[in-house]
Amino acid sequence: MLAPERRTRTDLVVAALIAAVIVVAASIAWVTGDARGTTSISAEEPVPLPEPAASVPTALMELWRAPSAATDSTRTPLPVVTGSTVVTADAGSVVGRDPRSGAQSWSYNRDLPLCSVVAAWNTAVAVYRDDRGCSQVTALDGSTGQRTAQRTSDADDAVRLSSDGTYVTSRGDTRMELWRSDLVRTLEYGRVDAPVNPGSQPRTGCTLLSSASTNSRTAVLEQCPGEAAARLSLIDPAPDDASEPEEYGSTVVPELVPGPDSPTAGRIIAMTGSDVALYFPAEDGAPGRVGLFDDTAARVSEFTLPTGSSLALDSPNFPATKAGSVLTWFTGADLQAFDSNNLGPLWNVPGALGSGAVMAGRLLVPVPDGISVVDTSTGLRTADIPVDRGDYDGPIQMSVIGDVVVEQRGGDVVALG
């Protein structure tokens, strides 16, 4: 019989060294990794969906409020509602709240600054900033707060997030990405660091001014070196290779010349599957105009907005939102409705403070001292609901969840019921 193998002193020393290396490596990974700076508290049970409102209220009072600077109107188009919860986002924390009480249902916190949060696919998509920009992305289930997907990629230091129902768009000044529901990138556009295939982008060095997307087209308005006016491009939101955009058409728009009074040179204000509406800045006190372009970026027609309807320079830079059968766009001074099929102008609400939201088939539009109830088919104001907003008089973006109205007022979210 063979004698059993015996461990020598050298074997023990080597084993101890290997164990020490493993412990040190694990410690370094813990200290430097994302997990150490992350705290996730999920809901014990999925939060149930609220019942839709049967009618529009005749009175509203404040139910609760919470800080939510990362969802203000410069970063995302609407207060974040994920189906069953209202989501607030401030500092490094994303919190899912009961719509009526504001009580915390779940939370997700990181030791990184939040860039923005947007609602998509019944999740809250949160983007955090690190040394690569607004690059770290996490999708949180709206009813439980559990992580459903994550990604990292290069990004600008500030981004605007939006969702068209199919894709989430993250757009900075020099770079844009689109993600599908598993957070896989479907499109990379603009600045690319160390590209695998140089020259894969149609242009370089451009500033991205505005964007909009549907499930079949993405529109980008950009100012490129050597071009006197802004350029509109229509591209595939999910080309065969995400790093190689496929254009359906691109054209320089002569009306969109940047200047001291119009630094953004107009913007994309609405989009359907086959049409894009661009805002043309007002000239010499005249009302603003809207140019319509087809899905190859060819000009189709234009029309003049109602007298006095012009874009405020500090208005939110987001396209129109769907409100029942129409699209509504907040100019910064009033509300303009467009036909959701052909983007033709329908009606206007002067003095509006935001784009509004639908409850019980009626459009609720924030106005000074309250909320106007508007018939979406005619634009007629059928009632006014008083709301005490104290001394706040800025723009208000609005969402509805059940019978609760959610207002984004600057860096705060306020629930009314």
Image (cartoon, rainbow, N blue to C red):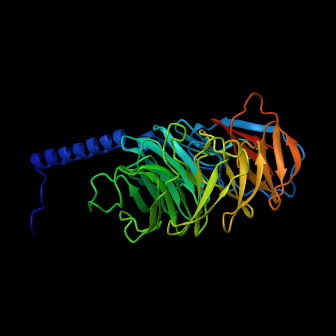
Quarter of the image with the N terminus in it: bottom left
Whether residue 77 sits left or right of residue 151 in the image: it is right
Say which quarter of the image contains residue 239.
bottom left
Where does residue 292 sit, x and y in percent of width and height? 60, 62
Q: Residue furthest top?
A: 391
Where does residue 175 sit, x and y in percent of width and height? 41, 51
Observer-nearest residue: 380 or 53? 380
Whether residue 339 sits left or right of residue 22 in the image: it is right
Residue 399 visible in image: no
Identified at 55% across, 38% down, the residue is 261
Observer-nearest residue: 316 or 75? 316
Where does residue 350 sit, x and y in percent of width and height? 77, 45
Whether residue 375 sits left or right of residue 91 in the image: it is right
Whether residue 232 sits left or right of residue 98 in the image: it is left
> Above or below — where is 394 with respect to 48?
above
Where does residue 343 sit, x and y in percent of width and height? 66, 63
> Above or below — where is 341 with respect to 204?
below
Quarter of the image with the C terminus in it: top right
